[in-house]
Amino acid sequence: MNLKHSFFFIGSLFLAFWLLISFSPRSQIVPQDTAVTTDLFYTVLDHQLISQDFYDFNTEILFLGNSYVAFKEAVAFKESQGKYNVVNTLGYLGKYQFGVSTLHVLGIKNPQLFLNTPALQEKAFLANTKRNKWVLRRDIKRFVGKKINGILITESGILASAHLAGPGNIKRYLRSYGVLGAKDAYGTDIPTYMRKFSSYDTSFITAQKKSDLALL
């Protein structure tokens, strides 16, 4: 092999090597601006990858453990399937099915504005739950951890039931040890809510005698 052919052969090898590395997969290369960290890791929900135990694909609700958010969303789903613009046959409004009289107590005078304003509905639920927790503060301290009619009494169960029946009816139910109960117009009773919503962490909610929506 002469010198000309040697240069040609070496050049061909170099070109082949360069082409090989140029078109190799880059799956291991992560650009700096998209590097994954444990604090900033988000994934798009994939129906094929997420278990039905954690996600309800019919309602598109991601289960959130026992947090306050999980608590309010569970109550909302029971009340209205989580829909803000619902008015039931008795005139109860919104995602959490508020009565007009309760809205007035919270300082909301315009039901239509309330129905059309999701953020206001969220504030109203928190404000009302804070108020119920204040009204029932002594009963929460006295009865949490006890069983009535075989149901373990918890703070979250009490607060959910107060949303259903009003704090006055919950006082009567607890202090009569389940003798004096109450049902809503559709037949849902206090024990149902006590049981269904018994396992949430509502310690985030502070008892507040007069809830000011402007402060939420």
Image (cartoon, helix red, strand yellow):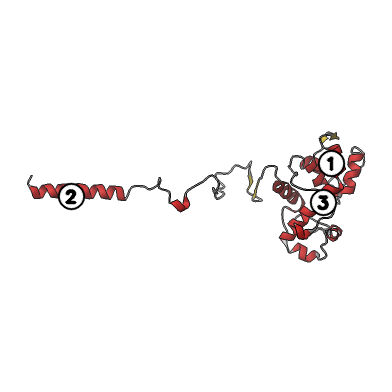
Closer to the camera, 80 or 103? Answer: 103
Q: Quadrant of residue 86?
A: bottom right
Q: Secondary structure at mark 1?
A: helix
Q: Quadrant of residue 83?
A: bottom right
Query: Between disc 2 and disc 3, whose residue precedes?
Result: 2
Name the amino acid, label 3: Gln
Whether the residues at callouts 2 and 1 have beta carbons within 8 Å, the answer is no
Q: Is residue 51 left or right of residue 121?
A: left
Closer to the camera, 183 or 107? Answer: 107
Query: Between disc 3 and disc 1, whose residue precedes?
Result: 1
Dot in front, 2 or 1: 1
Whether the residues at callouts 3 and 1 have beta carbons within 8 Å, the answer is no
Q: Is residue 60 left or right of residue 142?
A: left
Q: Secondary structure at mark 3?
A: loop
Query: Residue 175 location in percent, x, y?
Result: 91, 40
Query: Between disc 2 and disc 1, whose residue precedes?
Result: 2
Q: Which residue is mark 2?
A: 11
Closer to the camera, 31 or 52? Answer: 31
Q: Which residue is mark 3?
A: 208
Residue plotted at (81% across, 66% down): 110
Name the amino acid, label 1: Ile
Name the amino acid, label 2: Gly
Query: Residue 170 location in percent, x, y?
Result: 87, 45
Residue 85 visible in the displayed image: no
The tag on residue 140 is 1
Closer to the camera, 105 or 198? Answer: 105
